[in-house]
Amino acid sequence: MAEGSRIKQTSETTFETVIKAALLNDGYHELTSIAFDTERGIFPDNLHLADNSAFQAIKSD
């Protein structure tokens, strides 16, 4: 493997780790891909975690 490729992968992994930690620290919940409904494009068992104001804004348009 070329040196540049290894550095890029490490940097991307570090970036993803930092973003994930920040989101989880702010109250986001980690979900597994197994729970994802690919046909509907949602995590149906976790809809109660969603901010209802987003749904209200869509309904009022």
Image (cartoon, helix red, strand yellow):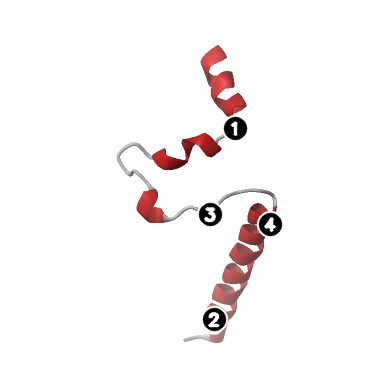
- Residue 30 tag number: 3
| Secondary structure beneath label 3 | loop
Vertical order, 57 against 16 (above or below): above
**Res 6 quadrant in image:** bottom right
Marks 3 and 1, how far apart in space? 16 Å
Q: Find out whether the residues at labels 3 and 2 contact each other: C-beta distance under 8 Å.
A: no
- x, y percent for residue 5: 52, 78
Furthest-left residue in view? Answer: 39
**Res 40 quadrant in image:** top left
Q: Earlier in the sequence, mark 3 or mark 2?
A: 2
Q: Amino acid at mark 2?
A: Arg
Query: Pointer 1: what residue?
Result: 51
Query: Pointer 4: what residue?
Result: 22
Q: Mark 2 against mark 1, which lies toward the viewer?
A: 1
- Locate the C terminus by quadrant: top right
Q: Earlier in the sequence, mark 3 or mark 4?
A: 4
Query: Pointer 2: what residue?
Result: 6
Q: Earlier in the sequence, mark 2 or mark 4?
A: 2
Q: Amino acid at mark 4?
A: Ala
- x, y percent for residue 45: 42, 41
**Pick the front one: 23 or 48:** 48
Vertical order, 60 against 46 (above or below): above
Mark 4 Cα shell of 10 Å, populated few (<14), some (14-19), many (≥20): few
Q: Earlier in the sequence, mark 3 or mark 1?
A: 3
- x, y percent for residue 55: 54, 24
| Secondary structure beneath label 4 | helix
Q: Mark 4 against mark 1, which lies toward the viewer?
A: 1
Marks 3 and 2, how far apart in space? 27 Å
